Amino acid sequence: MEELIAKRYAKAFSSAKKDLKESLKLLNILSEAICDDKIQKVLASPVVPNQQKTQLLLSVLHDTSDTMLINFIKILGENKRLELIPVITKVLNADEQKASNVYQGTLKSKEALDEKALHSLETTLKKYTGSNIKLIQQKSELDGMRVSVDDLGIEVNFSKQRVKEQLIDFIKKSL
Protein backbone atom coordinates (compact mmCIF):
# COMPACT_ATOMS: atom_id res chain seq x y z
CA MET A 1 0.00 0.00 0.00
CA GLU A 2 2.81 2.40 0.94
CA GLU A 3 4.58 1.85 -2.35
CA LEU A 4 1.44 2.57 -4.37
CA ILE A 5 0.95 5.88 -2.57
CA ALA A 6 4.66 6.68 -2.89
CA LYS A 7 4.55 6.01 -6.64
CA ARG A 8 1.78 8.58 -7.04
CA TYR A 9 3.72 11.22 -5.14
CA ALA A 10 6.92 10.36 -7.04
CA LYS A 11 5.13 10.59 -10.37
CA ALA A 12 3.63 13.96 -9.46
CA PHE A 13 6.99 15.31 -8.29
CA SER A 14 8.94 14.04 -11.31
CA SER A 15 6.37 15.37 -13.78
CA ALA A 16 6.43 18.81 -12.14
CA LYS A 17 10.23 18.97 -11.95
CA LYS A 18 12.24 18.45 -15.13
CA ASP A 19 15.75 18.18 -13.64
CA LEU A 20 15.65 15.80 -10.69
CA LYS A 21 19.37 15.32 -10.04
CA GLU A 22 19.82 18.02 -7.36
CA SER A 23 16.45 17.31 -5.75
CA LEU A 24 17.23 13.61 -5.72
CA LYS A 25 20.53 14.24 -3.92
CA LEU A 26 18.67 16.22 -1.27
CA LEU A 27 15.94 13.58 -0.99
CA ASN A 28 18.61 10.89 -0.50
CA ILE A 29 20.10 12.93 2.35
CA LEU A 30 16.66 13.43 3.83
CA SER A 31 15.85 9.72 3.53
CA GLU A 32 19.02 8.82 5.42
CA ALA A 33 18.07 11.29 8.13
CA ILE A 34 14.57 9.83 8.40
CA CYS A 35 16.04 6.37 8.97
CA ASP A 36 17.58 7.66 12.23
CA ASP A 37 15.74 6.24 15.27
CA LYS A 38 15.23 9.63 16.94
CA ILE A 39 13.62 11.15 13.86
CA GLN A 40 11.51 8.01 13.39
CA LYS A 41 10.15 8.44 16.91
CA VAL A 42 9.32 12.09 16.31
CA LEU A 43 7.55 11.31 13.03
CA ALA A 44 5.55 8.51 14.64
CA SER A 45 4.61 10.56 17.70
CA PRO A 46 1.00 11.76 17.78
CA VAL A 47 1.99 14.44 20.32
CA VAL A 48 4.23 16.38 17.91
CA PRO A 49 2.22 18.58 15.51
CA ASN A 50 2.63 17.96 11.78
CA GLN A 51 4.01 21.46 11.25
CA GLN A 52 6.87 20.78 13.68
CA LYS A 53 7.61 17.47 11.99
CA THR A 54 7.79 19.24 8.64
CA GLN A 55 10.07 21.96 10.03
CA LEU A 56 12.34 19.28 11.52
CA LEU A 57 12.80 17.65 8.10
CA LEU A 58 13.24 20.98 6.36
CA SER A 59 15.99 21.85 8.83
CA VAL A 60 17.94 18.82 7.56
CA LEU A 61 18.01 20.41 4.11
CA HIS A 62 19.60 23.57 5.59
CA ASP A 63 19.42 26.46 3.17
CA THR A 64 18.37 24.89 -0.11
CA SER A 65 16.97 27.11 -2.83
CA ASP A 66 14.84 24.31 -4.28
CA THR A 67 11.40 25.77 -3.55
CA MET A 68 9.60 22.97 -5.35
CA LEU A 69 11.22 20.38 -3.07
CA ILE A 70 10.41 22.45 0.01
CA ASN A 71 6.78 22.77 -1.09
CA PHE A 72 6.66 19.04 -1.83
CA ILE A 73 7.81 18.25 1.70
CA LYS A 74 5.27 20.70 3.12
CA ILE A 75 2.49 18.97 1.16
CA LEU A 76 3.65 15.60 2.48
CA GLY A 77 3.56 17.06 5.99
CA GLU A 78 0.06 18.46 5.56
CA ASN A 79 -1.16 15.06 4.37
CA LYS A 80 0.67 13.18 7.17
CA ARG A 81 2.89 11.35 4.68
CA LEU A 82 6.37 12.38 5.82
CA GLU A 83 7.30 8.79 6.64
CA LEU A 84 6.89 7.97 2.92
CA ILE A 85 9.89 10.09 1.90
CA PRO A 86 12.35 7.12 1.86
CA VAL A 87 9.94 5.08 -0.29
CA ILE A 88 9.32 8.03 -2.62
CA THR A 89 13.07 8.53 -2.91
CA LYS A 90 13.56 4.85 -3.73
CA VAL A 91 10.95 5.09 -6.51
CA LEU A 92 12.53 8.27 -7.91
CA ASN A 93 16.01 6.70 -7.82
CA ALA A 94 14.70 3.65 -9.71
CA ASP A 95 13.06 5.89 -12.33
CA GLU A 96 16.28 7.88 -12.69
CA GLN A 97 18.24 4.65 -13.21
CA LYS A 98 15.82 3.49 -15.90
CA ALA A 99 16.02 6.82 -17.69
CA SER A 100 19.81 6.96 -17.65
CA ASN A 101 20.25 3.20 -18.16
CA VAL A 102 22.88 3.16 -15.40
CA TYR A 103 22.41 0.71 -12.56
CA GLN A 104 24.28 -0.02 -9.38
CA GLY A 105 25.14 -3.55 -8.30
CA THR A 106 27.13 -5.29 -5.59
CA LEU A 107 30.01 -7.70 -5.85
CA LYS A 108 30.47 -9.81 -2.73
CA SER A 109 33.62 -11.84 -2.28
CA LYS A 110 36.26 -12.79 0.27
CA GLU A 111 38.97 -10.83 -1.48
CA ALA A 112 38.67 -7.52 -3.30
CA LEU A 113 39.13 -7.49 -7.07
CA ASP A 114 41.52 -5.05 -8.68
CA GLU A 115 40.18 -2.20 -10.84
CA LYS A 116 40.99 -3.98 -14.12
CA ALA A 117 39.08 -7.14 -13.19
CA LEU A 118 36.16 -5.10 -11.85
CA HIS A 119 36.01 -3.06 -15.05
CA SER A 120 36.14 -6.26 -17.13
CA LEU A 121 33.21 -7.68 -15.15
CA GLU A 122 31.23 -4.45 -15.63
CA THR A 123 31.94 -4.57 -19.38
CA THR A 124 30.77 -8.17 -19.59
CA LEU A 125 27.57 -7.33 -17.73
CA LYS A 126 26.99 -4.38 -20.07
CA LYS A 127 27.39 -6.72 -23.06
CA TYR A 128 24.69 -9.08 -21.80
CA THR A 129 22.24 -6.56 -20.31
CA GLY A 130 22.68 -3.55 -22.55
CA SER A 131 22.90 -1.35 -19.44
CA ASN A 132 25.81 0.36 -17.77
CA ILE A 133 26.37 -1.28 -14.39
CA LYS A 134 28.59 0.18 -11.69
CA LEU A 135 29.66 -2.48 -9.20
CA ILE A 136 30.46 -1.79 -5.56
CA GLN A 137 32.61 -4.35 -3.78
CA GLN A 138 31.66 -5.75 -0.38
CA LYS A 139 33.58 -8.21 1.73
CA SER A 140 31.82 -11.43 2.70
CA GLU A 141 32.67 -14.91 3.87
CA LEU A 142 31.50 -16.39 0.56
CA ASP A 143 34.10 -18.74 -0.93
CA GLY A 144 33.73 -17.41 -4.45
CA MET A 145 31.80 -14.36 -5.60
CA ARG A 146 28.26 -13.11 -6.00
CA VAL A 147 27.21 -10.33 -8.35
CA SER A 148 23.74 -8.88 -7.92
CA VAL A 149 21.93 -5.99 -9.58
CA ASP A 150 18.59 -5.85 -7.80
CA ASP A 151 16.94 -3.31 -10.08
CA LEU A 152 17.54 -5.53 -13.11
CA GLY A 153 16.81 -8.78 -11.28
CA ILE A 154 20.30 -10.17 -11.91
CA GLU A 155 22.12 -12.45 -9.50
CA VAL A 156 25.14 -14.52 -10.48
CA ASN A 157 27.04 -16.81 -8.10
CA PHE A 158 30.44 -18.39 -8.56
CA SER A 159 31.17 -20.73 -5.68
CA LYS A 160 34.34 -22.82 -5.49
CA GLN A 161 32.47 -25.51 -3.57
CA ARG A 162 29.74 -25.72 -6.20
CA VAL A 163 32.25 -25.97 -9.06
CA LYS A 164 34.09 -28.69 -7.15
CA GLU A 165 30.85 -30.65 -6.61
CA GLN A 166 29.88 -30.33 -10.28
CA LEU A 167 33.31 -31.46 -11.39
CA ILE A 168 33.15 -34.54 -9.12
CA ASP A 169 29.63 -35.27 -10.36
CA PHE A 170 30.77 -34.99 -13.99
CA ILE A 171 33.70 -37.36 -13.39
CA LYS A 172 31.41 -39.91 -11.73
CA LYS A 173 28.99 -39.81 -14.66
CA SER A 174 31.75 -40.23 -17.21
CA LEU A 175 33.12 -43.37 -15.50
Image (cartoon, rainbow, N blue to C red):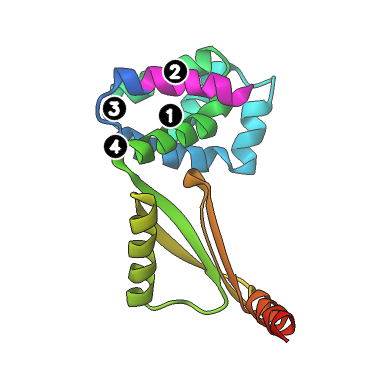
Please name the residue that numbered disc 4 is placed on: 22
Please name the residue that numbered disc 3 is placed on: 66
Q: Where is the N terminus found, in terms of image quarters?
A: top right
Q: Secondary structure at mark 1?
A: helix
Q: Is residue 45 visible?
A: yes
Q: Left or right of 142: which side holds 99? A: left
Label 2 to label 4: alpha-carbon separation: 18 Å
Which sits in the foreground, 116 or 81?
116
Label 1 to label 3: alpha-carbon separation: 11 Å
Which comes before the other along the chain, label 2 or label 1? 1
Name the amino acid, label 1.
Answer: Leu
Q: Is residue 73 visible?
A: no
Q: Circles 4 and 3: CB distance less than 8 Å? A: yes
Name the amino acid, label 3.
Answer: Asp
Name the amino acid, label 2.
Answer: Lys
What residue do we see at 25% from left, 30% from top? Answer: 19
Magenta highlight range? 1-13
Where does the image place residue 43, in percent across and percent down from the top left? 62, 28
Q: Left or right of 55: which side holds 127? A: left
Q: Left or right of 128: which side holds 109? A: right
Which comes before the other along the chain, label 2 or label 4? 4
